[in-house]
Amino acid sequence: MQKVFEGLSGGVDSAVSAALLKQQGYDVTGVFIKIWQPEFIECTWKEDRLDAMRVAAALEIPFLEIDLSEQYKEKVVKDMLENYAGGVTPNPDVLCNRYIKFGDFAEWAFASGADFIATGHYSRVEKGNGNTALLRGTDSEKDQSYFLHRIPDNVLERTIFPIGGMMKRDVRELAKRLRLPNAARPDSQGLCFVGDVSLKDFLRRFIPVEPGPVINMKGNVVGTHDGAALYTIGQRHGFSVRTAKGTTATHYVVGIDAVANTVRVSERKRDAAKDSAALEDVHWIGSIPVLPFEAHVEVRYHSTPVRARIESSEKGVRAIFHEPQVVSPGQSLVIYSASGEQCRGGGVMGF
């Protein structure tokens, strides 16, 4: 019997995943992964762990816990804060999956005798002809392949996403039929370690944030902002703008200078758009593709996939958009096949 370590978060998705694995004949162990949470935020991980334990008890499977809080703080939170302080918008969920769930947790699980690891992500793994592919989840509204594009190949081939081919509503219904103790638990929102605190208030605890000037495309001061590190390209709220007529037409952030603590805005969203984006720290799933090639890309989670040409450049890889896109340095650009179904990999955007 093959042994699977299922990451039990306390939520319904991982609970149903564990139930399905057991039904399929796997030897399932539920594992709660403890991550870092700052002292000033009301503790939620204890409640999550309790829900995970209840699920394990209901399914009559062993329950383990691994404390990866220090690793999370060092590999995810530290990088996030450094990026925000530099005026770059990071993607901590991508880092969490790469270095924690499919990094340290996977390494520990395999060393502890697991043949596979499993999570409640809405994505699919397909194997054939000696290759392992990452595909979108069947439920397009819940597809999480964007956040999983950096999983190492040697981990992906030993990963199972039991609910990747299901719709969310069916997962909920199955949880009720199985009488899982967390069947009615609402989905978590936002960054797991931030809790009910706004990201703005969270960042203020760790990096210098001071009000500063908002400038227009000509460099004239037209308003004020709460701190350049708190904004991202394309944002259209959270700052004040004064116009000659006293009106407050919609303005978009088109530039951030963390050193000067200025935010540049424009009434034209097009001024925030770029024809291309340089990709840094590129990770390919499977064989490295021959460049150039046509692809679909997502410039942020759940953004509408757009067509782009992926080609080599002096600094590595660049995505040339068929139509200009609003992109934020530090965010992930994830590359999909021309059909849009298979995730080929991705990288961190720069200009």
Image (cartoon, rainbow, N blue to C red):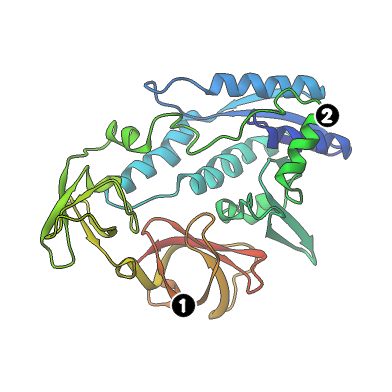
Q: Residue at x 71, y 44 (%)?
A: 168
Sort mark 1 into few (<14), some (14-19) or many (20+) by Cα contacts within 10 Å. Answer: some
Q: Residue at x 77, y 26 (%)?
A: 180
- Please tell me which of labels 1 and 2 falls first in the chain: 2
| 1 vs 2, front mark | 2
Left or right side of 214 for 345: right
- Residue 29 at x, y percent in the picture: 75, 29
Label 1 sits on a secondary structure element that is strand
- Callout 2, which amino acid? Leu
Report the residue marked by disc 2.
178
Can you tell which quarter of the image residue 171 is in?
top right
Seen in the picture, residue 188 relative to 329 is either above or below; the reply is above
- Callout 1, which amino acid? Ser
Report the residue marked by disc 1.
312
Label 2 sits on a secondary structure element that is loop
- Residue 148 at x, y percent in the picture: 59, 52
